[in-house]
Image (spheres, grey):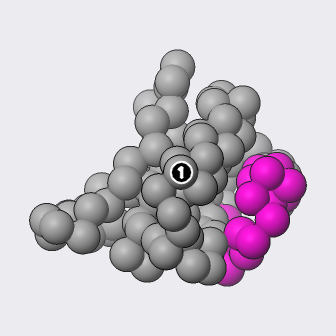
Amino acid sequence: MQHTQLNRTLSISPAEPLWKRVPTRDDQGHRLSDFMMIIPKLRNKPQQLLQETIAEIQSVLEYYHRAVVFADLNLKLNLLWVSVRPIPGICLELPTAIKLRVPEAVLVGQQVEPT
């Protein structure tokens, strides 16, 4: 994936559930890993700070574009979901990079699938 776009789930229209949108395998058929982060009070930030936070997340995801397959930011839930290629350590390295740029972000869970 050349350029990762951060999808925002808008509260004004129902979005398809993540289980329908999140890819489970990459283009070569390898299983993907997922992690999610809660960003407390994100949706309540002033618009300028919200945009800056989204830009910080986007910057990290673009830096890791070779690993990131899917990303979704749900503002209603203050939840960031990221699916990545099966690269050893990426489910800790990438959330750590996000936390460095967005200190309030908290890694909630990860799902690592065996290859």
Q: Nearer the viewer, residue 106 or 12?
A: 12
- Quadrant housing residue 96: bottom right
| 10 and 4: which is toward the camera | 10
Up/down of 98 relative to 75, above or below: above
Query: Magenta segment: does it hold 30?
Result: no
- Is-magenta flag for residue 96? yes
Q: Nearer the viewer, residue 66 or 49?
A: 49
* Residue 113 horizontal/vertical position (percent): 62, 64
Q: Does residue 32 appear left or right of residue 76 in this picture?
A: right
- Residue 40 location, x and y as percent? 62, 79
Q: Is residue 65 visible?
A: yes
Q: Residues within 10 Å of mark 1 (few under 14, many from 20)?
A: few
Within the image, what quadrant is residue 27 found in?
A: top left
Q: Which residues are magenta?
A: 94-112
Looking at the image, residue 87 lies above or below residue 1: below
Locate residue 30 relative to residue 101 in the image: left or right: left
| Residue labelled with disc 1 | 48
